[in-house]
Image (tube, helix red, strand yellow):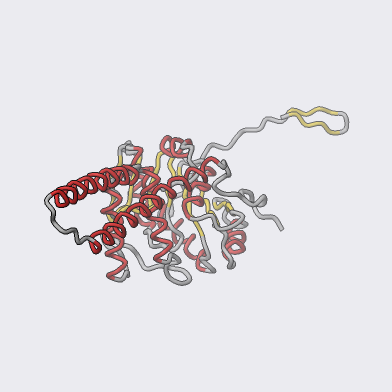
């Protein structure tokens, strides 16, 4: 770097800081004052008092409470913590992507801010990574405090997801360690609408799994996902990684055509035999079935068209506020 002052030219050598060995990416949304305690718990549990080069990237996904102010106050005393503040709520997938894009570590761990992902597993995940495992995934052995209906719907989603994509992500969550190469590969994917767990599974990198029990949520309120939102999320994730629903539409159309030909031949044979045709009930039933099938097929096609429309617009998946990604100054 060359610096000029009072007509004098000074040459200053700038030595870049080495990248941290480990980056923690923590999506944050309306965690309230609990975020301060939770961040300290994560850092303490992750490194067990050892002084390792690391960074913590808290990605605020449009919180409406005091989460941002709390994190900014922490960054003034703990320089390992950085804040990425999105302009609005873009969703957890976007927050994860923003955190991965900002992470500089040789390995990156993604975990929730509410301590449902136990940070005590981080040393074990790092140990597996040092042995050459590129992806370390935490897998749930229980669903925590969920109703029977929620557990059934979750089981149904994972079954359908495996049927359509042949990817087994049952029990997996966003709590993962990714090698730098995997992170760079993930960031190079061109699509804006992403399913983090699905894409990591699709990539096929060597992985190891660590079982864990879901902890009690440490934060304000319970789950912020309604069942209708979860349904939309499930449909988006399946169609993001599989074109099989479109093939099913084609197969259903072919089956309907074959069924129509069979019924037509039977009706023609009955007419030639002079058998009275009494088919108002049958006709009405066929109209309802075929009409419903057509509408369902159009719905599936329109969903894929919506995804194409969202992608070809070329808008970024998220936007970051200008003051983010740097230290807070009074």
Residue 51, image x and y in percent? 47, 48
Identify the residue at horizontal 54%, vertical 47% (top origin).
317
Residue lying at the far front of the rendered structure:
274
Q: Is residue 111 above or below residue 107?
A: below
x, y (%) of residue 18? 54, 36
Residue 209, percent from left and from top: 28, 48
Q: Quadrant of the C terminus?
A: bottom right
Q: Is residue 208 above or below residue 145?
A: above
Camera-nearest residue between 21 and 167 = 167
Quarter holding the N terminus?
Answer: top right
Q: Nearer the viewer, residue 195 or 28?
A: 195
When asked about the image quadrant of residue 276, the answer is bottom left
Q: Establish if 63 lies above or below 298.
A: below
Residue 119 in the image: state x and y as whole percent. Answer: 39, 57
Which residue occupies the foreground of this view, 16 or 216? 216
Residue at 37% from the left image edge and 68% from the top image edge: 216
List the single residue furthest toward the left: 273
- Residue at 45% over, 66% down: 224
């Amino acid at each position: 770097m060359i610096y000029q002052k009072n007509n004098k030219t000074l040459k200053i050598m700038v030595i870049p800081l080495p990248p941290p060995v480990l980056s923690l990416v923590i999506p944050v949304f309306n965690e309230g004052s609990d975020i301060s305690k939770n961040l300290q718990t994560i850092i303490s549990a992750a490194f067990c008092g050892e002084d390792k080069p690391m960074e913590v990237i808290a990605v605020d996904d449009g919180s409406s409470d005091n989460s941002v102010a709390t994190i900014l106050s922490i960054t003034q005393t703990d320089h390992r913590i950085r804040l990425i503040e999105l302009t609005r709520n873009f969703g957890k997938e976007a927050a994860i992507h923003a955190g991965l894009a900002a992470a500089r570590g040789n390995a990156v761990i993604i975990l929730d801010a509410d301590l449902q992902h136990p940070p005590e597993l981080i040393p074990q995940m790092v140990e597996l990574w040092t042995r050459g495992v590129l992806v370390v995934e935490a897998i749930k052995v229980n669903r925590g405090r969920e109703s029977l209906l929620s557990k059934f719907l979750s089981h149904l989603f994972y079954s359908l997801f495996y049927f359509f994509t042949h990817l087994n992500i049952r029990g997996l969550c966003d709590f993962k360690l990714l090698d730098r190469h995997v992170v760079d590969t993930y960031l190079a994917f061109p699509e804006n609408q992403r399913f983090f767990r699905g894409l990591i599974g699709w990539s096929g990198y060597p992985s190891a799994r660590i079982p864990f029990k879901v902890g009690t949520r440490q934060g304000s309120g319970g789950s912020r996902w309604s069942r209708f939102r979860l349904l939309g999320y499930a449909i988006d994730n399946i169609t993001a990684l599989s074109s099989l629903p479109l093939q099913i539409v084609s197969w259903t159309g072919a089956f309907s055509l074959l069924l129509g030909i069979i019924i037509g031949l039977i009706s023609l044979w009955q007419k030639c035999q002079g058998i009275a045709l009494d088919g108002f009930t049958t006709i009405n039933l066929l109209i309802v079935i075929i009409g419903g099938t057509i509408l369902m097929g159009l719905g599936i096609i329109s969903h894929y068209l919506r995804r194409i429309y969202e992608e070809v617009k070329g808008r970024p998946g998220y936007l970051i506020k200008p003051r983010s990604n740097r230290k807070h100054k009074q």
